[in-house]
Amino acid sequence: MSSTAFLLLDLEPINTIGINVLEPLLKTQGLNVTNGTNISEVPEGTRLLFIETSSQDAWGKLKEQLVNLRVKCDIVLFNLDENPELANRALLSGIRGVFYTTDNADVLMKGIRLLLEDQLWYRRDIMCNALNRMLQFNKDALHKLTDGDIEPVKLTKREKAIISLMSNGSKNKEIAEALSISPHTVKTHLYSAFRKTKCRNRIELLSWAQQNIPDEIR
């Protein structure tokens, strides 16, 4: 496994945490650390790419940088201000972790060690928020697969009348005469009822009607 880390520094950093603190800490973990200001400088074999995200339009700039990333590696953001939405976006986008401007050396070291163990490094509230979003998404998806997609079957008055006559043993011709319509029209209404109820034949349709609209076919 590669033991290289790269620090992608901002052209106008708000502090020197990348060079003065983060880089030395990474080296204590046996990582070969290099840095630069252009994402094209990230060398092949990089395991961890630390991107400084201290600008106002941090997310927009980050997207532009990642479009030009040609190396497969784990991405970590550092020098974030207190921006929960940015951290949420990062987590949901597959970024492995974030470090804040307020994080001290102990926090940085703990995060680095967990990242090297292929774990994530996010604050608890960010993890909970992302988990809640995922759970809500799954809840909505489940609702669509169950109750959300099961709409009440709405048969027309004519369709119910045909089913009622059919339940008394009447044939299509007899139903047509009773309702003063053609046998072809009877078939059309029956096909519509089959489609709405997802029944395949008359027996299934009658069984469905007895269970769902018993008072309307007597």
Image (tube, rainbow, N blue to C red):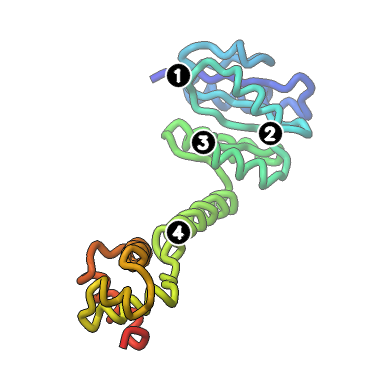
Viewer-side label of 1, 4: 4
In the rendered structure, which disc, 1 or 3, sits on the residue that comes first in sequence? 1
- Residue 212 versus residue 1: which sits nearer the camera? 212
Q: Measure the alpha-carbon separation of dots 1 and 4.
A: 46 Å
Residue 119: image location, x then y, percent: 45, 38
**Amino acid tagged 4:** Lys
Q: Is residue 137 visible?
A: yes
Q: Residues within 10 Å of mark 4 (few under 14, many from 20)?
A: few
Mark 3–mark 2 CB contact (< 8 Å): no
- Residue 131 versus residue 80: which sits nearer the camera? 131
The image quarter in which residue 170 lies: bottom left
- Residue 24 versus residue 39: which sits nearer the camera? 39
Label 3, secondary structure: give it: loop
Mark 2–mark 1 CB contact (< 8 Å): no
Q: Measure the alpha-carbon separation of dots 4 and 3.
A: 26 Å
Residue indicated by mark 2: 59
Residue indicated by mark 4: 144
In the rendered structure, which disc, 4 or 2, sits on the residue that comes first in sequence? 2
Residue 97: image location, x then y, percent: 55, 37
Label 2, secondary structure: give it: helix
Residue 32: image location, x then y, percent: 51, 16
Left or right of 159? Residue 122 is right
The residue lying at 26 percent from left, 72 percent from top is 173
Viewer-side label of 4, 2: 4
